[in-house]
Image (cartoon, coloured by chain):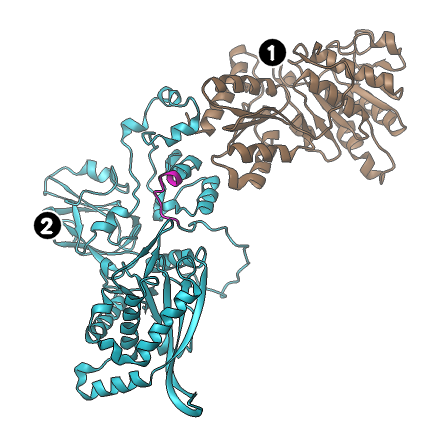
Amino acid sequence: MATKVFMEALSPTMEEGRLVKWLKNEGDAVKSGEELAEVETDKAIMELVARGDGILRKRLINEGDTAPVGTLAGVIATADENIDSLVAGAGTAPAGGAPAPAQVVATQQETAGASSVPRRPEESQGEASTPPQQKVADVPPAPPARAAAPSAPAPTPAPAAQGEVRSSPLARRLASERGLDLHSVQGSGPNGRIIKRDIEAAAAAGAAAPRAAAAAAPSAPVIPREGDFHDEPLSQIRKTIAKRLGESIGPIPTFYLTAEYDLTRVMEMRKAMAELGDQFKVSVNDVLLKATAVALSQHPEVNAHWLGDKIRYHNRVHLGMAVATDEGLIVPVIWDADRKRMSDISREAKELAKRARERKLKPDEFTGSTFSVSNLGMFGIDQFTAIINPPEAGILAIGTSEEKLVVVDGEPVVRNRVRVTMSCDHRIIDGAVGAKFLQTLRRLIENPLMLVF
Amino acid sequence: MPVITYRDALGAAIREEMQRDDRVFLMGEEVAVYQGAYKVSKGFLQEFGEMRVVDTPITELGFAGVGVGAAMVGLRPVIEFMTWNFALLALDQVVNAAAKMLYMSGGQYKIPIVFRGPNGAALQLSAQHSQAWESWLAHIPGLKVIAPGTPYDAKGLLKSAIRDDNPVCFLEGEMLYNTKGEVPDEEYLIPLGKADLKRQGEHCSIITHGKMVLVAMQAADQLAKEGINIDVVDLRTIRPMDVEAIGESVRKTNRAVVLEEGWEICGVGAQVVDYIQRDCFDYLDAPVIRVHQADTPMPYAKGLERAAKPDLPKAIAAVKKVMYLD
């Protein structure tokens, strides 16, 4: 029996993927579990894997092309099997949403995330051709009631190119006002167009997490001149950054707290440890990560997520650390960072940063952080403010550590100092709460032996 | 309140204005002895005499020009065209003289004239005599264009038109003369440029004028039985158009059908849709749909004529389409 290969949701936030490279040619024999193709998701390059055995009879997405999640990407069948009817459905999303897991799996875990990705279900012909009389009969007493009925048949959505969302201007405005992401709303209008009743239904169901609108008003056009610019299509990761961070700076009432810490003892400790052998070498950043994680474990009021109608305080500390890659920012996570030894954190941070730059992170390695840290010290930045990675309550921006002339006991002395700035979501953290957290952090950093306590 | 016909409402409006102001006079083909081709000026000759109720030869351009000249020297003519189809011959006076005189004379000559007559298709009058001209006339800066759909509006608007100091083209529905409606005895005026919300609903707006107001009201009745309640916005004045009224309704219902008697291309509805997209873009939940005459000369054959005209089933179908119910 033939097996369909779909563009799968290979990351929790993936809505479309670019087929980077086919690893099998048409006519190649493939076994269940074998890699078929490389797919660029919004975060990483991952592999599509076949579970069914057979011949890769047809490749339906060209290399370099981008297709929405759920698009038929290929067909695996026996050599003589007739696959015309399967191929005829190419370019459309699978019926009923997510493809059955038996048909294709990713090399990496996709369990929780995959189900959260909105799909574009395709209707059967039978439903789409419901006689008009029957639909009209649905109408009384008032048409909006029909919209609320979950059984209302949605017209067949056209295969959306590039994750495009069809929506009425009114729906876009309402979604923007209510903080709904149109990608999370199912359209019931012609060609799957999202209309007012869909927004109302989504808002009523609370189905979509509050988010800023995807569609922003276009800015006033400027007339660009040749040579003034060059156009670069958005990479998946750039799109995700724009979407996520735009969500952050808009609705989050942020305030900033800056503190300068003395690193004298950190430097002494590092030196002492390094003298014990290379395996004991740690960076300033490693110490700061560990100190932040320990401080967070003592301040659950900061180790929190904003969930719209509630605040979730985390008992475990999963520390996100912003990593610059050639493609852009990504935030891998050190799980249970407060409980890990400094050496573990050091090794893990290095490993995660390396794989982030190679774009080989697994989804569970860049999701789930409870608080994040961003360090631009290596670029000589004295201090800066970082943008909160929603739904987290805050982010710590670490500047460069350098020698400074400071006054200690009335005497000018040269000390190693570092400036940190914490961006706080005021919906969760009040000024004094953030300040106390930074106080704890100061105690830990200026007395790093406490970290082994 | 007395119930009278559209024709009598028009007659009452002219009579009252002629009684009120002796500069007002009526001129046109068959208006005096025959008492009007559609009997609007019944009894006028006896009441006002042949100086103020003037029969003309079949010379549209000529008597339209006499009217413009009379207006230039201070009279307030009401020029009756037997139909607006015949007024094509007079358009040079309407468009090039009446509409532009105030402008080209640097404000020296006001032209307080009303050109009036039946407009639009009746029944089987064929291609040359079944035309709705409001989009042509509304295109011209300097003209005001009125198309009332009810006796009440016809009387109040015609009185305002006669008192207006600018040339006004007053388009009466040929099929409306016998329709009846409540019209008070006491005097009233309806300001030009003001639409009337003839029906209130929340699901869709029909924006229309003239004869099609009746069709829209029937559509509203039928749709109400299916639980669909619509706004009927009667423009009443095509130029200047009541943009605020259109916007208010569409922002409420988020959906609109524009219904008119004339042809599609560059029609009145095209202008209405433009105002909607300009002012209500972020309030639209569906594309606006227009209902109009088929893009063809009006057929004589009865079945074809029916197929070409905008009518009740087409209006209802459009509302359902714009509501995604078809």
Q: Residues within 10 Å of mark 1 (few under 14, many from 20)?
A: some
Q: In front: mark 2 or mark 1?
A: 2
Q: Is residue B78 left or right of residue A208?
A: right
Q: Nearer the viewer, residue A180 or A227?
A: A180
Q: Nearer the viewer, residue A425 or B302?
A: A425
Q: Residue at x 81, y 38 (%)?
A: B103
Q: Which chain is brown?
A: B
Span colored in magenta: A202-210
Residue A414 in which image quadrant: bottom left
Residue B6 in which image quadrant: top right
- Of the numbered discs in the image, which one, if any, rests on residue B123? 1
- The residue wearing badge 2 is A32
Q: Which chain is cyan?
A: A
Q: Amino acid at mark 2?
A: Ser
Q: Position of residue A322 (x, y in %)?
A: 32, 67
Judge whether B128 appears above or below A302 on screen.
above
Q: Is residue A285 left or right of residue A229?
A: left
Q: Chain of mark 2?
A: A
Judge whether B5 appears above or below A309 on screen.
above
